[in-house]
Image: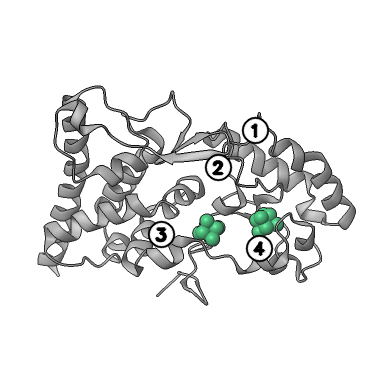
Amino acid sequence: MENINFCSRGIHICQPDNNKSCAACCGIYNFIDNSLDAVFERLGRNSLSAGMSDLSMSHVKSHSKKWRKRDNDEQSRLFPVIFNCEFAGFIDKEKNKAGCLLHPCIHGDTRFIEIGFHGVDMCLNHFCPSYFCLTEQEKLTVILSIDHWFLYGLVITDIDIVKCFVDNINNSLGNTFDPWLIARSQDLKNVFADFFSFKLNWPFADSKKRLFGKYRFYGDEYEINTIPYEKLGIQKSVYTPIFLSLASFFNNSSEVIKAENIIKSHVQRAVAEINRMCVCD
Ligand code: SF4
Ligand code: SF4
């Protein structure tokens, strides 16, 4: 497969290509302010302050002393059980790739990453559930349709939204579509990119509660959010995993129907474009 990176666990979803990457498990989204601007600013700050261009042990230690506690205090951290690492930053000059500033792939030895909170073994050998739960088709669908690191990290780690959308398209087609079609059609890429962008601009997202995807946080505890279909007087939607991933809140049944129609129209657009391409082939 051209331009896609592989590792011992198959497609290297952490660093899938030269244009983007993920650093979600280093805690980059685990802040009360998770906006693109705020995350961008923190990654840039870490890259500069940890001395990416001129890495030294004294730089690394003083950066850690300055930020580890602050990034993990009550005012900053969203979910206290997840550690926010002060060494997640941009690993390229163009600021397209989020990743570990101390990684031996960059510096050639493990001396620096030993300073990290989790230690060498965990940082170098961690593979999140997406490696095991997403199929190759699902991984490639995300990789080939999203260009920006911020959205990519949010989506590749959200197993439910990827599975539910891809399943609905496969079911409508009556077969498993080839994700490489996305690389051949800008229209198809736009459908997937528009759909996954709902992670950033979903009109029914609940901004009042402290939600991250389907999770709701109460201090050290969390629970999975639910949609009260019975109270709303409507049947459970086939798109429930998507609604939960998008932190949805509905005031009434007509909002649920509107939300269903939005998702359905994206499924139908994808199916129509895939069918068109397959007939032309
Ligand atoms: S969350 Fe998963 S894909 Fe993202 S950096 Fe961690 S292991 Fe890689
Ligand atoms: S030291 Fe570990 S947790 Fe921190 S950025 Fe590097 S890989 Fe992530």
Circle 1 sits on which residue?
76
Residue at figure coordinates x 53%, y 63% from the top left: 15
Mark 1 or mark 4, which has the lower sequence index?
Answer: 1
Task: Choose between 39 and 232: the one closer to the eye.
Answer: 232
- Number of numbered discs on residues: 4
Residue 54 point in image, percent of width and height = 82, 55
Q: Is mark 2 within 8 Å of ligand 1?
A: no
Quick check: 26 left or right of 22?
Answer: right
Quick check: 21 left or right of 201?
Answer: right
Residue 267 point in image, percent of width and height = 19, 49
Circle 3 sits on which residue?
143
Residue type (three-letter) at the residue carrying disc 3: Ile
Q: Nearer the viewer, mark 3 or mark 1?
A: 1
Circle 2 sits on which residue?
29
Residue 150 point in image, percent of width and height = 50, 45
* For residue 42, above or below residue 121: above
The answer to whether the residue labelled 1 contacts the one labelled 2, judged by CB atoms less than 8 Å apart, is no
Q: Nearer the viewer, mark 1 or mark 2?
A: 1
- For label 4, the SS is helix
Residue type (three-letter) at the residue carrying disc 4: Cys
Quadrant holding the C terminus:
bottom left
Mark 3 or mark 2, which has the lower sequence index?
Answer: 2
Please tell me the numbered disc located at residue 123: 4
The answer to whether the residue labelled 4 contacts the one labelled 2, judged by CB atoms less than 8 Å apart, is no
Residue 248, quarter of picture:
top left
The answer to whether the residue labelled 3 contacts the one labelled 4, judged by CB atoms less than 8 Å apart, is no
Whole-number angstrom distance, CA of label 3 to CA of label 1: 30 Å
Residue type (three-letter) at the residue carrying disc 2: Tyr
Task: Choose between 234 and 32: the one closer to the eye.
Answer: 234
Whole-number angstrom distance, CA of label 3 to CA of label 2: 19 Å
- For label 2, the SS is loop
